[in-house]
């Protein structure tokens, strides 16, 4: 059941629909393509001006000292805060303002914000500018309905989520802009479908293996050690032994799709010996490098995950110690999951039930997003992802968001805000 105040606010969301869509259309028309990170300043200021006009105190934070923050492609994050009657609790909405490149296969202009058949089209509309629009207008609906909040609301639009979020949420968490003293609840407005709640994500270990053999004349390969052959042995061992072992490990996390509930490993790239397209040279390959993507579960510890890789390399090496290797860690993301019994999850679930009419499934994401930084660096325990876009639409050609989903997600966010902050 919704209270009278809540029904009032839901009606305001409907009234604000056209204004929200217009704002979203403008956002889509700022092509914040990452890489390399274009037009971030325009986008951050556009969002910041809207927040200011809606009564927020607005702060712009450039990630000083981060290597990706260049004169050519400057980074800028925007944070708005609106105090309630009390400072606490604080609900923080976060969305990333960068979008992936459009790629090929579009039948509409990816940066026009075309509206057709109840949908708005554009690169990044689902992932995840619709989420930014929904959270800003959810809180505005409360304000326009004249409902006062007990706690405070923050909204942030941050950079570089698509490339790891270091100049965005990581920087802001690391430097105290996001911290657990001030912020109690975080809703990241990523697209996991407008009727589901995402509790967290699995872990990632990207590593590079360099195999060093010995060069020799290609006509007498028995005089050298071919590094590509050694890498082939490693990959064969992964196929024969590691993959079946990982396929036995299933997480309790409700990852969607269910195929992603198992631990996995994937070869991302491989390069060895003479470069393709270069001049021919009759040599035994003395170097082979490969990059692997190991997705690990909340039940696996990173130390174990890494030592399994080291053990495999050592075993192979002991069998035939005429070569050497180097293992390099490229990226480590630890798994994270918010407890489903927490206030944030429970209130969002009841808000979805009341705005959409059904109990939402609680899921976890197969890939990672900025929750890792909020949870592990800022130390904020109650963090979820919820937004209007459809997960399957992310990064696709002809990406779109349904306008009815935008409105429904906006209502869910408004109800959640009122219930968490005791309107
Ligand atoms: Zn995203």
Image (spheres, rainbow, N blue to C red):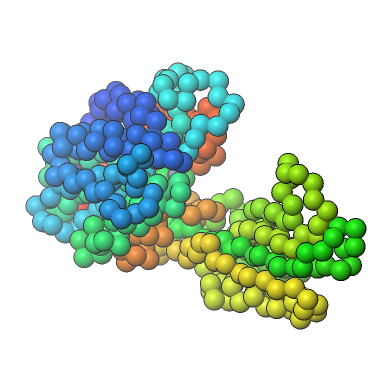
The furthest residue to the left: 85
The quadrant in which residue 323 appears is bottom right
**Residue 214 x/y as whole percent:** 77, 68
248 over 60 or under it: above or below: below
Looking at the rendered image, the quarter that the N terminus falls into is top left
Residue at 55 percent across and 24 percent down: it is: 106
Query: Is 306 or 397 nearer to us in this picture?
Result: 306
Q: Which quadrant does ligand 1 occupy?
A: top left
Residue 230 appears in view: no
Numbered circles on residues, count: 0
Query: Is 416 or 111 nearer to us in this picture?
Result: 111
Q: Is residue 224 left or right of residue 277?
A: right
Residue 329 appears in view: yes
**Residue 295 x/y as whole percent:** 58, 61
**Residue 330 x/y as whole percent:** 53, 62
Residue at 24 percent across and 36 percent down: it is: 45
Q: Is residue 139 left or right of residue 372?
A: left
Residue at 26 percent across and 61 percent down: it is: 175
Residue at 25 percent across and 53 percent down: it is: 91
266 over 27 or under it: above or below: below
The quadrant in which residue 21 appears is top left
Query: Is 229 or 120 nearer to us in this picture?
Result: 229
**Residue 72 x/y as whole percent:** 36, 39
């Amino acid at each position: 059941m919704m209270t009278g105040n809540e029904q009032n606010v839901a009606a305001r969301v409907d009234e604000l629909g056209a204004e929200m869509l217009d704002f979203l259309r403008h956002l889509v028309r700022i092509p914040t393509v990452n890489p390399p990170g274009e037009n971030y300043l325009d986008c951050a200021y556009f969002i910041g001006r809207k927040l200011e006009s809606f009564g927020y105190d607005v702060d712009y934070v450039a990630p000083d000292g981060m290597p990706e923050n260049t004169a050519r492609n400057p980074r800028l994050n925007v944070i708005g805060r609106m105090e309630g009657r009390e400072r606490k609790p604080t609900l923080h909405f976060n969305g990333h303002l960068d979008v992936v490149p459009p790629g090929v296969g579009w039948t509409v202009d990816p940066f026009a914000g075309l509206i057709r058949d109840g949908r708005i089209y554009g690169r990044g509309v689902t992932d995840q500018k619709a989420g930014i629009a929904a959270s800003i207008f959810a809180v505005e609906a409360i304000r326009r309905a004249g409902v006062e909040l007990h706690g405070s609301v923050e909204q942030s639009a941050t950079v570089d989520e698509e490339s790891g979020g270091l100049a965005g949420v990581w920087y802001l968490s690391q430097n105290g802009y996001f911290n657990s003293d001030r912020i109690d609840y975080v809703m990241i407005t990523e697209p996991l479908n407008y009727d589901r709640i995402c509790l967290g994500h699995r872990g990632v270990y990207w590593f590079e293996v360099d195999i060093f053999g010995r060069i020799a004349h290609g006509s007498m390969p028995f005089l050298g050690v071919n590094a590509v052959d050694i890498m082939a042995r490693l990959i064969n061992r992964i196929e024969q032994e590691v993959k079946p072992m990982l396929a036995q490990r299933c997480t309790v996390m409700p990852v969607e799709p269910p195929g992603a509930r198992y631990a996995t490993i994937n070869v991302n790239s491989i390069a060895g010996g003479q470069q393709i397209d270069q001049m021919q040279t009759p040599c035994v390959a003395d170097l082979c490098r490969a990059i692997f993507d190991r997705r690990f579960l909340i039940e696996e510890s990173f130390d174990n995950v890494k030592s399994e890789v080291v053990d495999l390399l050592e075993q192979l090496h002991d069998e035939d110690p005429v070569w050497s290797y180097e293992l390099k860690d490229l990226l480590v993301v630890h798994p994270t999951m918010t407890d489903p019994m927490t206030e944030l999850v429970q209130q969002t679930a009841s808000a979805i039930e009341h705005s959409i009419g059904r109990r939402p499934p609680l899921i976890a994401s197969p890939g990672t997003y900025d929750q890792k930084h909020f949870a592990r660096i800022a130390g904020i325990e109650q963090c979820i992802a919820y937004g209007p876009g459809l997960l399957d639409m992310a990064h696709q050609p002809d990406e779109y968001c349904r306008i009815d989903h935008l409105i429904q997600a906006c209502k869910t966010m408004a109800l959640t805000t009122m219930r968490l902050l005791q309107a």
